[in-house]
Image (spheres, coloured by chain):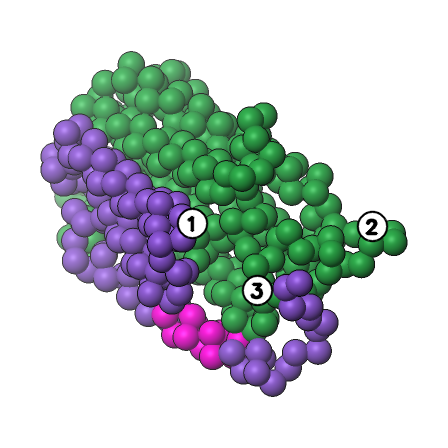
Chain colours: A green, B purple
Amino acid sequence: MSTTLSRLDKVKTDAWSGGKSPFNVEYGKIMMWFFLTSDAFTFSAFLVYYGSQRFAHLTWPDPDKVFQSIPFIADSGYPLVFVGIMTFILIMSSVTMVLAVEAGHRGAKKEVVRWMIATIVGGLMFIGCQALEWSHLHHQGFWWGRIPTEAGIPPETLLEPYFTHGISETAALQFSNLFFTITGFHGLHVSIGILLNIIILGMTLNNTFERRGSYLMVEKVGLYWHFVDLVWVFVFTFFYLV
Amino acid sequence: MSANQHDHTSVAHTEEHHEPMSKKRIWQVFFYLLALTALEFFIALALVHAGHIEKDWTVKIIYILLTLWKAYYIVAYFMHLKFETSGFILSITTSFILIVYFIVLLLIEGNYLKTNFNPFQFWPMP
């Protein structure tokens, strides 16, 4: 019986036989990037639809009038302040995530834990702020399929505080639906991201990555978290600024 | 025969790419993003809201350009895409040309609806 392997049985390691990962990027990382690309298309579809609705209506709620409160501090008169705080929190959590990934490259487990906890806290703060925004709008009478209405008061009077160039019930309804849908979809992504971060934190504490010899998983989850921040940058621009 | 010598092929490869993103660089990019965001807020609050500038389409274009600039920094540095191979960068970014087309298309459609289809009740500001 021969002990040498035939050519067919030898493990092949050249580029076309699995010996090299395409683009020199690990498989899981490529897949995460491809998922993020597809998710970017989904968010783009929502945001472009929002844009086309704004273009299709003669008037649209003025975000500076709809969002001018700071929870627990002021009920009106401060447009952009609270959402600015939210944006800052999310960007900060993105920075702490990058720092966690960088610590992972050096194999510094304690630092990875510290920065992951900071990222999770930032994410929870953002979700809390978003919940406050939602509840404020909801208490004013907005919800999916609902705008402020009151028996005996004409709609144009009730909606007047939210508009600058003319009033329209349909525009208010569209705005309300799209706001809750798009920020809700984004909030869902943030929540899933927080969950993933907690799982990765657990795996780090459990020494899973020490045993594997690589913190690559932290990097992959970090990509997802940055994507969430990126989407927020666009949502913020199109809902609050433009 | 041992067949599993090559599980870790790419894990070792990726390490060499990551030196450029030092802690110093990370904070630099953060302050850059903060500056761009602060600029947006400055334009929005100190210029537009204070009444010095009208919120016309030039202001909106500036907002969008600043946002795209921030997006570039997040994707290139925080998500590390700048340091990958050009083939990978292309495989992720080229599909977004379709989004540009989609935006233009939907804005044209929206405009058509505005001029030709407005059955919704409209009240001018009192």
**What amino acid is at disc 3?**
His
Q: Quadrant of the N terminus of chain B?
A: top left
Residue A167, placed above or below residue A126: below
Asked if residue B64 lies left or right of residue B7, the reply is: right
- Foreground residue among A173 and B15: A173
Q: Chain of mark 2?
A: A
Mark 3 lies on residue: A165
Q: Secondary structure at mark 2?
A: loop
The reply to the same-chain question for discs 2 and 1 is no
On the image, the x and y values in percent for residue A231 come to: 42, 49
Quarter assignment of residue A69: top right
On the image, the x and y values in percent for residue B51 come to: 40, 53
Q: Earlier in the sequence, mark 3 or mark 2?
A: 2
Residue B49, numbered label: 1
**What amino acid is at disc 2?**
Glu
Is residue A189 visible in the rendered image? The answer is no
Q: Is residue A204 magenta?
A: no
Segment tinted magenta in the rendering: B100-110
Residue depicted at x 45% and y 37%: A81
Asked if residue A48 lies left or right of residue B73, the reply is: right
Residue depicted at x 63% and y 64%: B125
In space, the residues marked 3 and 2 are separated at their CA atoms by 23 Å
Q: Chain of mark 1?
A: B
Residue depicted at x 51% and y 49%: A64
Which of labels 2 and 1 is toward the front?
A: 1
In space, the residues marked 2 and 1 are separated at their CA atoms by 31 Å
Q: Secondary structure at mark 3?
A: loop
Q: Is residue B104 magenta?
A: yes
- Foreground residue among B115 and A132: B115
Residue A30, placed above or below residue A214: below
Mark 2 lies on residue: A150
